[in-house]
Image (cartoon, grey):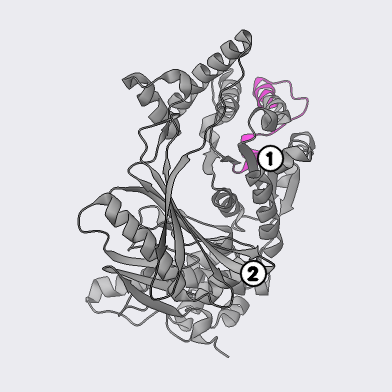
Amino acid sequence: MPQPEHSLRPAAETFEYAGCQITVVGFDEIVAAAAADQPVELLRGAALPPGIGSARLSFSTRARDGDPVYRLDASLRIGREPQPAFGVLGRDPVGLLLARRAAARDDWGVRVVGGVGAAGSGVSRWLGRPPAPVREEQPVRSVARTDPATGLRATVTYHRPPSRFAGGGPLVTVQASVPSGQMSPRHLAAMLGVVLDIAGRAAGGDGPHGEYVLSRYPMGPSSGADAAERVTLDQVGGLDAVVAQFRQIAVSFQHPQVMARWGARRPQGILLYGPPGTGKTMLARALAAEIGATFREIRTPEILDKWLGGSERNIKRIFRDARRYREPTVMLFDEFDSIISYTGAGMDAASQAINAVAGIFKQEMNDLIEHNPNVIVVATTNFPERVDDSLIRSGRFDIKLAIPRPDHSGRAQIIAKMIRQLMTRHETAGFRMFADDIDVDGLATASAGMTGADLKEALRRAQLAKAMQEARTGAAPTPISQHDIAGHIAELVIR
């Protein structure tokens, strides 16, 4: 039997607020995720009104007086994001240039700023001075806002940036709580309406306009340049146990004070192994999104060098930079076996160079977390038997996870999530990308043995075929059907 339409295309409700159209997609999914202790980010990837540096809106559950309530938390940066001044650099043009380049993760800027910062810390220790305390942004005033339609009462707090920031605008936070029995899509829209109203008043002009989407896979007005590259753990299908473990890792990363109080050390390294196309790289990206970290992929050319001593210098530089990162960072060594290998007792120059790189890697991984707790290392490989045990022993890589080909249930879950994400991103009033006859269970049966990458390719071919048909004829084709997807799966299936 075909899947009912609502199982793939979640219900959507649209509201008007001060010239903005706000659509809440899949409200039941949002509530279910929040009830499972998974805070949902509702503005990820949204385009922002002019004059706004950043904005976020999260939805979660809390207990108050023993009763569950839904919590809405928003933050809004007026003007551009603040740039760390890095203390010793000063506010002169050179200092500000270095601060901006380091904040943008430019390798040269990171190395220069890291070196200056290390020198400054050494001088402070030599003089017997304690490190300067980290100052948070200070609240200045709070006001209450009430939405007359829902009764939503929000507390709006304005903050002043501390002196350690250079050039950043003020921060505004908004908080509201709704009893679990009263929560509705209109409350989500009302909260965003408050945020947009604040943005409009702060940015001046006629205020914000356009269409905004609130969902588990939000895109905001139209699309962002890198929206298709964003991935979260919510979007990972067929790997429930792995996703659950990654959420636990993220929690340990986000609460260093709790870890320190118990003398507990979070995982320093994670090894993911399994067949190609099973989602190992995607999982690393999703972990970075879950933590709120920068994603840094180390590619083969960054390490391997044909010149004598070049590879050893490169691996040392990569870890030297990693020790200086001032923001949470997920470092990915993709195809680990081809980048960091070990040949044993080989006597030729090439083998000695490979062994030297592996040796440096092991030394650096021994105490990376002690030097910089902001960094977590993820390595992936399709051939775990090629990786020497000494490279991935516990203490260096504390977690080792097999990522297998998805089974029937996993493939159905992957297909459903992929199609739903495409619907959320591309379907608009008057345009439907997928027909109502999509049967994910049937597609999962037809795609036995395929990986998530294979399923994504089948959908890509279906999208391309429809786009090319419209480009050639000038007429809108019918939506992508069950028959269309099954045909592209048949082209790819391994016989």
Residue 257: assigned label: 1
**Residue 176 at x, y percent in the picture:** 50, 62
Q: Is residue 401 magenta?
A: no
Q: How many labels does the image show?
A: 2
- Residue 17 visible somewhere in the drawing: yes
Q: Mark 2 falls on what kind of element?
A: strand
Query: What residue is shown with label 2?
Result: 68
Please identify the quarter of the rendering in which residue 347 is found: top right
Q: Nearer the viewer, residue 102 or 8?
A: 102
Query: Please, what is the three-letter code of the amino acid marked with disc 1?
Result: Gln
Please say if 30 is above or below 328.
Answer: below
Q: Mark 1 falls on what kind of element?
A: helix
Q: Which residue is drawn at 49% across and 75% down?
A: 26
Instruction: Judge from the rendering whether residue 386 lies leftward or rightward of residue 181; answer left or right.
Output: right
Q: Residue at x 56, y 39 (%)?
A: 329
Residue range of the region highlighted in magenta in the rendering: 333-357
Q: Residue at x 67, y 40 (%)?
A: 256
Q: Crowding near pointer 1: few (<14 within 10 Å), some, many (20+)? A: few
Query: Please, what is the three-letter code of the amino acid marked with disc 2?
Result: Pro
**Residue 494 at x, y percent in the picture:** 60, 68
